[in-house]
Each structure stands twice: as structure tokens, then as C-alpha cells.
Image (tube, grey):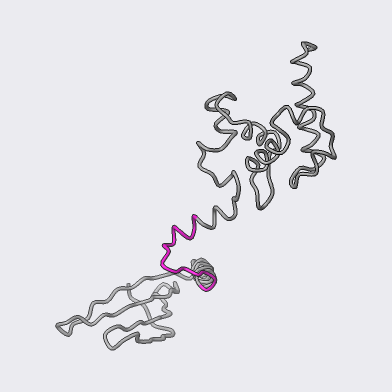
């Protein structure tokens, strides 16, 4: 491709490696950036490689480089691969049960295997829906059930006695009370 160099910058990272950033214009007036790297070989010859980005894509290049520099400046890599860091970020963003493997999630286990394959804590976790930033719904449910003596300890509880558990507010307490009420009616044959 024949092109005129409009502007050029260069730098060397060593005696044997040189970089060139050229802003060029084609004979048909298309503008582009050519980033070139020139490596000196043991025999004294040079191997050149380059990439070209056309003017209509400059904003993509700038955006990608900006994002790359920003994120690399804010990462503490310590030998981790980029994929390791991405996975950690996903788990941090999706803490608790959403970050679990699908086959371990209570709702997915319920769909796949039915309620008999879930622990009491997992069943209660499905009812309450979420935990707190420091405790997932299964751990919260387990703590509640141990403290109250299992499902039997949930029967007859009021909102204030359930809300004493961090992560259980009036809405979650009402859900538990309603389910216990349904269970009590079924047990008594009133349904």
C-alpha cells in the first residue's frame, strides 16, 4: 500500500529492537496509523512486523488502550494469569451463591434432583433468597436452623424473633412465617 508519512515517532527498547509509530495517508486520502517493530537478527539483518489501524477505528484503539492501561495500573498481578484475574473479579462481583458452580447451587439442585436431595439449609436458603455480603443464604439458613433447633424451631415464630438474625428483615421473615403456616395447615389436614 503506497502511503505518505504525515507524522512519525520512534523509540528503541534496546540496541536491537526499535519501534516506529507513523501517521500515514494513502493515495486515496485514507488515513491510518502504522505501528512497526524492527528486530535485529544475529546475522545483522532486520525482521519487521507491523499493525495498521485506519482512521475510522482510531476511537476503538484509543478506548482499548485506555482500558488496558487503566486496568493494568490497578491490578496487583503477582504471577497470576489474566484469566485468573478475570475469574477472581467475576467471583468478587458475583459473591455468595451466584459465584458457586451451577451443580452446587440450591435452586439448580432443586430443579435437577427435587427437594429431597437438598439439605434443610438449602431449602430454607431458597426461601430467603439471599444472605448478606459476609454470609451466603445457605450459611445464614444453617445458622438459623442450628440456633432454633431445625424447622420445628421456625414454627410459631414472629417477625421480630426471626429478624434478630442479620440478613433477615421483615420481608424474609414474612416468607418463612407464611411457609410455616402452610406446612402447619398441611400437617393438620386443613388443606
Asked if residue 62 is positioned above or below residue 176 in the image, the reply reads below
- Does the magenta portion include 86? yes
Residue at position x 81%, y 34% in the image: 174
Q: In which quadrant is the N terminus drawn?
A: bottom left
Front residue of 70 and 54: 70
Give coordinates of residue 159: x percent, y percent: 84, 37
Q: Is residue 60 visible?
A: yes
Residue furthest toward the left?
43
Front residue of 89 and 13: 89
Residue at position x 73%, y 27% in the image: 152
In the image: residue 139, left or right of residue 104: right
| Bounds of the magenta segment | 73-87
In the image: residue 97, left or right of residue 48: right
Count the marks: how many?
Answer: 0
Asked if residue 137 is positioned above or below residue 49 in the image, the reply reads above
Residue furthest toward the bottom?
15
Q: Is residue 56 visible?
A: no
Q: Quadrant of residue 179?
A: top right
Amino acid at each position: 500500500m503506497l502511503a505518505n508519512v504525515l507524522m512519525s515517532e520512534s523509540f528503541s527498547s534496546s540496541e536491537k529492537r526499535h519501534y516506529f509509530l507513523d501517521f500515514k495517508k494513502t493515495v486515496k486520502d485514507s488515513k491510518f496509523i502504522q505501528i512497526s517493530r524492527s528486530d535485529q537478527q544475529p546475522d545483522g539483518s532486520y525482521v519487521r512486523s507491523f499493525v495498521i489501524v485506519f482512521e475510522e477505528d482510531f476511537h476503538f484503539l484509543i478506548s482499548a488502550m485506555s482500558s488496558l492501561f487503566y486496568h493494568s495500573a490497578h491490578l496487583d498481578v503477582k504471577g497470576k494469569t489474566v484469566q485468573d484475574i478475570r475469574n477472581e473479579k467475576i467471583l468478587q462481583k458475583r459473591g455468595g451463591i451466584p459465584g458457586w458452580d451451577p451443580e452446587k447451587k440450591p435452586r439448580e439442585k432443586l430443579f435437577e434432583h427435587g427437594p429431597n436431595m437438598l439439605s434443610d439449609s438449602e431449602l430454607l436458603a431458597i426461601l430467603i433468597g439471599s444472605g448478606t455480603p459476609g454470609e451466603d443464604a445457605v450459611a445464614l439458613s444453617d445458622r438459623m436452623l442450628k440456633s432454633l433447633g431445625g424447622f420445628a424451631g421456625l414454627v410459631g415464630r414472629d417477625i421480630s424473633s426471626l429478624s434478630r438474625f442479620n440478613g433477615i428483615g421483615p420481608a424474609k421473615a414474612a416468607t418463612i412465617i407464611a411457609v410455616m403456616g402452610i406446612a402447619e395447615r398441611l400437617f393438620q389436614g386443613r388443606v
